[in-house]
Each structure stands twice: as structure tokens, then as C-alpha cells.
Amino acid sequence: MSLNLGQIFKFAGGVHPPEHKVESTEQPIRTVPLPKTLVLPLRQHIGHIPKILVKVGDHVLKGQLLAEAHGHVSAAVHASTSGTITAIDEQVIPHPSGLPDLSITLQADGKDEWLKHAPLDYQNMERAELIRRIAESGIVGLGGATFPTHVKLRPDARHPVTTLILNGAECEPYITCDDLLMRERADEIIQGAAIMQRLLGSTECLIGLEDNKPQAVAAMNAAVAKANFNAKVVVVPTLYPSGDSRRLIALLTGKESPAKGRTTEIGVQCFNVATAQTLYRFIAHGETVVSRIVTITGNVARPGNYDALLGTSVRDLLQAAGGIRDNTDDYVMGGPMMGFSLPSVDVPMTKAMNCVIASTPSLFPLAPMEMPCIRCVACADACPVNLQPQELYWYSKSNNLEKADEYQLFDCIECGCCSYVCPSHIPLVQYYRYAKSETIAQDRAKQAADQARIRNEERLERIEREKQERAKKHAERTAKAETAGDDNEKKAAIEAAMARAKAQKETVIPQNTEAVSPTVAAEIASVDAARAKAAEKTE
Amino acid sequence: MKFSPFFTTNTSVSVVMLKVMLALVPGIIAYVWAFGYGIVVSLILASATALLAEAAVLQLRKRPVMPFLLDGSALVTAWLLALALPPLAPWWLVVVGTLFAIIIAKHLYGGLGQNPFNPAMIGYAVLLISFPAIMTQWPAPLELTSAKLSFVDQWHYIFNRALPTGIGLDAMSSATPLDYLKTQLMLHHPIETIAQAKFFGTFAGKGADIVAGAYLLGGLYLLHQRVISWHIPTAFLVTLALISGVFHLVNPAQFASPLFHLFGGATMLCAFFIATDPVSGATTPNGKLIFAAGIALLTWLIRTYGGYPDGVAFAVLLMNIFVPLIDANTQPRVFGHSK
């Protein structure tokens, strides 16, 4: 099984929903005008929140570092244009929760003035230094997962990477930003791949595209030929979710990444094509991540792909696409299979935002009434992970989380294939999301309870230990006293103690009933009498 | 609020059930051609009973009536039961069987999707045990009888047990080939002679083999439409052919040929329509193979050594019991797992 023949392997399952890609591929990439205000959430990646380096009132230049990567897995955030920081506070971010998160608000000065930047002499740079610089670039996986790229480029002695895979499959319906990027900026992608290849020390590079993008395939092939870079463009059949990295790796290499491990364990590292292109811009021009290409499609006047500054509001993006048309009732970020409804159009574009679909009730209608599962296993046939969704559904619904875990609930990639084909219109993925979060919550609660139990056990142990120590000390002391003094002395001490106790008993216990009126005093006397009587009775 | 995926295929339970019913149509047409209109009356009776029972139980259970009535599952159960019953049976037999299937076998277990046993086969088994005499009274192929009943005559007979003057019950009824084979074998006649009987056709019973062929056709449509997967029909038919083939080769006088088993009795109906019931059947690919092979083995055993002429119903019900066990032990390898 040679990998260089461009042989296509297969993965089980998958679906072929209507593509709706033509609408947004008729025009070249257009640029969104500079907005007045930009909002830059600090959490635009998976991992730790970066450390803020600026304060309100600071004037910053385009590309300037606003917050630096903090921790092992983290990514930097830069100013996407020149202007003044007007706020550092919580703003609504594009997240299904609709909850606000810490963000930097930037008032553009209109000059869009770049910070002085220069290409990196990466060929003569030490690898560790280069990785450190890339960590400052703010590059994350631009396919939507937003994992910090420098972490994936770090050398790993245990798992050397032999195969670099560029993901240009773009299997979700409606999304075409990678398609257009490959058509227009293929050279930069290939240059980026060459840099990645060098960093990883891999020996081969495969670029996977679905066969519904012939123009992108041609452009990429031309770029590979021109660059004289040893890469192979492999065309895979259009079948959702071939763009999922593990599915694409299986398609191109025939190897399955271990379920609980990393792809590097089978010698493969996979990046989105846009990530490679962004890396090239940083290395060859010194440009940090300040913009991305986003598909604006659906019910808008001019659907297409737009090059926009990070932090541009979705409202401005829709405006750039000619504005929404009648009946628009929802805005979906990402594709229709895995995306989510935006909480508002007044959220900023982040590094994760590859697509916004203005939808109407007819475009994405409400699902029909949920019927019972008839175990037809259309879902199992569609599952690209080879799970048994009907069983996972059964156990998730009945809150049998242990059993769901046993059926590998956590291997579910939430691609939506099962829900897509279900004749009973069961929102299966929702059940799995619920079961997963519930399992995680229970695990956390269990951990907390375990910790509390351990603490309590240790406390009891300590009390017991201290008691024994005290008893031991006491025994030692009495033993000492016995050997030191004689019996008379001891007897005298006991008698003295008893006399003291007796004296204490005889002293009148002070009562807080002095200086009261005669009626109250009489009452107290009667109550005391009653008490005495009662005491007599019980005796 | 909507959630991903934001769109789905246009399929529904109703569409699935409609396709199953559509796939039964060739078989029904062949049935009418070979045995007369009796089956149409049974189908109408069973359908009406099933819909009424379903509506009544849904009402009692405080479930939305229309969506569940329109899902078509009750009709499929009714049709499968009607096709399994002798079309000369009195009206109440069809009604009792259907009521049992819908109310007890389906709704008492929780309704659509919850029944551990195939409801139509439960209905059939109850009738076979309770009314064995009526259950073995089958119409003779039209080809062999002069007693042809019109639709109205059939209706009359089924409701009033009244036959047109000049036609006796003997003239229009006959034993089934499976039944005849069993009784003749007990009398130690070799199969060669038994098969000379006039109601034996090319493969199995005269007319019945054509109906079986029509079921096969409908089954291929279901496969093409991906309503069913290949696993159950293939494993069922291949296993049945293999067992009967081996025994037939060893002793052709005592054991019927594979073709007789494949095209006789309810084999084809079982292969594509009964064993493939998704709710009560196995779901994993390997599980389906085991499940179907088990039904084939039990069917052959009951046909050959059991007390009943056909073994499909009991074989299916017995294998239904093993479904959870089979499914739990045949989980396919998950992507990225060694096993």
C-alpha cells in the first residue's frame, strides 16, 4: 500500500446533502470596507485565554500584539487595524451560549496603518525560536477548530511526523472560503505547506480536496508544479464529512488515528489550507493574523466570499454582502450540518468564523415532529465513526450514561449525519451533546466528592492520630509521676481536687434575674417551683 | 431555537412504511391472480381493524392520534398479518388477530418502536395456536378449481360463511403443499411421489411460487430503496437453501429440495418483509446475519420436524428474544479503536 500513488481509501458512512456552493463561488473574494469599531474577543481559539498587554486609551497599530499567548495551549490576539482601545470588557461573542466574554474594543482611526513588520529568515532560524515566533503570530486552525497552530508544529520526539496533510476538502454545504482561497491564493498555500514540511520534518505532503472543486484542484496542481515542492493533490469523492481531519487522513492514507490519541501517533499532522496560507503570510511578510476569508451566503443580496478584518461585526459583513433579503429569521455560523445560530448579528467575526448563512424558514425549516426510534439504523449506516447511534440515543435518553460511554459516546464527532438521515426526525446530536456534558458534569462532581471523601478520611485519621499521641503522652506523664512521687502525695492531690470541685458546686450560680419587678419575680418563682416539681417526678 | 443539522432528508417513518406497502403490491396482485379476491377482503378487514384499534389505543394513551396513525406502521402490521392468514378465514379471525397484534403486541409494550416481538407474527401465532383448524384451510389455486368466487361472493363467505349454490367448501379449498408434504411424509411416501400432487407447481405450491416470486420482486425494490439492507434477506435465504440443500442431497426422498423451501410457505415474505422488521430485529451488520440465519435454521427445523406446517412465525418470534443478546455481542469496531 504505497501512499504516494494518490490512492483513495474509504471511511464508513457519510452523507451527501445538497451542496449549495455555487451561490457563493460566482464572484472572486471581495474586501469588506474598514469598519468604525472592531471587537476582538480574547478567546478566539481552543486553550487558555491570552494575557492582555494594553489598556483602555492606548493607540495601537494594525498587527500590534494586544494579548499574548499564555500557557501551553494558547494563541495571541492582535489589533486588526490601527486605532484606539476604547474598552476592555465583556461583549457578546459568536458562541451558541450567547454569553458575553472578555473582549477588546478597538475604535478604528481610518488609517489602517501597519505596525512595522518584516519577513522572518526562517531558513536560518532555530526551530524552537521559530515556534516561539509563530506562537506570537496568533495563527490557529482556520477550518473552524481554532487549535493554536504552533502547538501542532512543535517537534515531538516520540511521534515523528512523516506525512503532512493539507485539508482543502471543505465538505460542509454552503461554505466555500477554502475553495476560493485555493483558486486565488494557491501559491501562498503551497509556500505555507513547504514551511510546515520543514518545521515538522515530514517527508511527504498530501493535499485533499473534494471532487466538487475542479477549479481549486487545477489551481493547486499548478501551484505545486510551479513551486517544485513535493506535494500531491489528491481528489476525494464529495461525501460529508470527508473534511473532518481524521476522516481525511483515513481517505488519503488508509490509516485510522487512534480514538484516544493524536494523529501524530500514526505519523500524520493535518492543517487547513487557510492555516498554511496564513502561516506563509506571517513568515514571508511578517503579517500577524488580522483578517480571514468568510463565506456570506444564504438569503443575502450578494452571496460570496469576503476578506474581512477580525472583529468586524456580522452586521457589517451582511451589509458588505448586499444586505439581507426578506424573511431572514436566523443567522447560522458555520455550515448547516455542524454550525449554530448566532445569538445576534452584533457579534464580531472571529478566527473560527468561516461562514455565515442568512437563513429563512423555508431554507432551514423547523424539523417535523419527533417520532419514536424504529431502529432502522439509517443513522448507523451514515455514521462516519462507525458508532451505533440508535444505541447511543437509547442510553442518552434514558440517562444511562455509563452504557453510553461503553458504546463510545465520546468518539462522536457531532457531524450530524445521523440526525440528517433519521426518518423519525430525532435530533440525535442534541441527545449526545446532552449526554456528554452530563457525563462530564458527573465526572467532575464525582472527582469533587472523591476529594472531599479523601479529605474527610485524612481528617479522621489525623484526629485519631492526635488522640493516640495525647494518650501516649498522658500515659508517659502519669508513669513519670508514679515513679517520682509517693502515694500520699498523690492522695493529697486527689483530695485537694475533690475539695475544689465541692466548693465550686456550693457557690451560688448567678442568675440574670436580679433587679426585676415583683410580678416578674413572682412568675420566676412559680416557674422554678414547677421545675422543681417536675424534677422530683422524673426522679 | 434551531440546532444543527439545520436541514434533514425528506424521509419520514410514513415514507418508509409506504415504501414497504408499495413493495407488497406485486405480491398482492399475484395473490389475487392465483387464489382469487379473498385476500383483498382480508386486507381491507385487517387495515380497518388496525387503524381503529391504533386510534383508540393512542387516544387512551393520550398520544397524538393523527401523526401516529399516519406513520403507516399499523397498516404494515395489518397487511403482513392478512397476507399470512388463509384468505378463506372468517372475518372475526382477521379482526382478532389484528387486535392482538396492535393492542397487545405493539401498544402494551409502548407502541411504535418499543415492541420486542414482531406484532404481525404475534397475531399469527395466537391464531394458529387458538384456531388450528381454520388456520389450515387454504384456498385451492384458481387454476385447479372450477369454483371461482366473485368479490361479492368472497365477501359473503367471509362474513356469513355462505357459499353460492353449487359450490362446496371442498371444491375451493385444499391443503397447502407444506401441510400435504408433512402428512404424506408421515405416511412414508417418498417426496418424488408426493410432488406429483396436482397442486405442486414449478418450485413449490402451484400459484404460491408465483406469489413468492412477486414478493421477491418487491423485496428487491426495498433493497434498491435502501429501506432494508442486504444482510437479513441474504443470510436468511442462503442459510435456508444450505441446510435444506445438504439434507436434500443426503436423502432426497425424505427432505424437500431447497427450491421448495425458498419458494414455499412464507419464505419470501419473511425474507424481505417480516424478518426485516427493524424494531424487533437485530441492528448491527453481523447481528443481522446471525439473526436471519437463526430464523432460517428454526424455520427449517419446524417445517421438517415440528408440529406446524410452516415455521416462519415461531422462528421469527424465537429469534426476537435473542436480539438484545445478539446486538450487544456484535458491536462493530468503532473508528480508531483496535477492537
Image (cartoon, coloured by chain):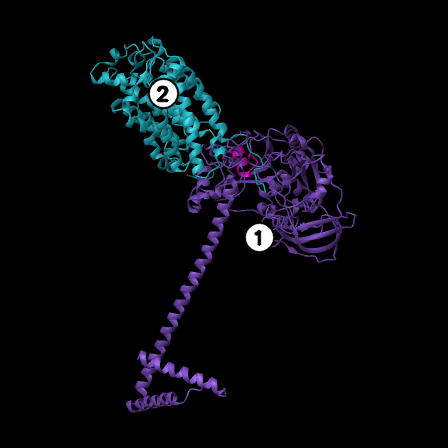
Chain colours: A purple, B cyan
Q: Name the residue under label 1.
A: A72
Do discs 1 and 2 belong to a common subunit?
A: no
Say which mark, if any, is on residue A502.
none
Residue ranking furthest to the right: A111
Q: Main secondary structure of the magenta part?
A: helix
Rendered position, A53 above or below B250: below
**Amino acid at dot 1:** His
Task: Identify the chain of the residue marked 1, using the numbered disc in the image.
Answer: A
**Residue B12 placement, left or right of B155:** right
Of A155 and B287, the residue lying toward us: B287
Residue range in magenta is A240-253
Marks 1,2: beta carbons within 8 A = no
**Amino acid at dot 2:** Phe
Of A273 and A309, the residue lying toward us: A309
Q: Name the residue under label 2.
A: B159
Q: Which residue is drawn at 35% across and 21% down?
A: B266
Look at the image and tell me whether residue B226 can be seen: no
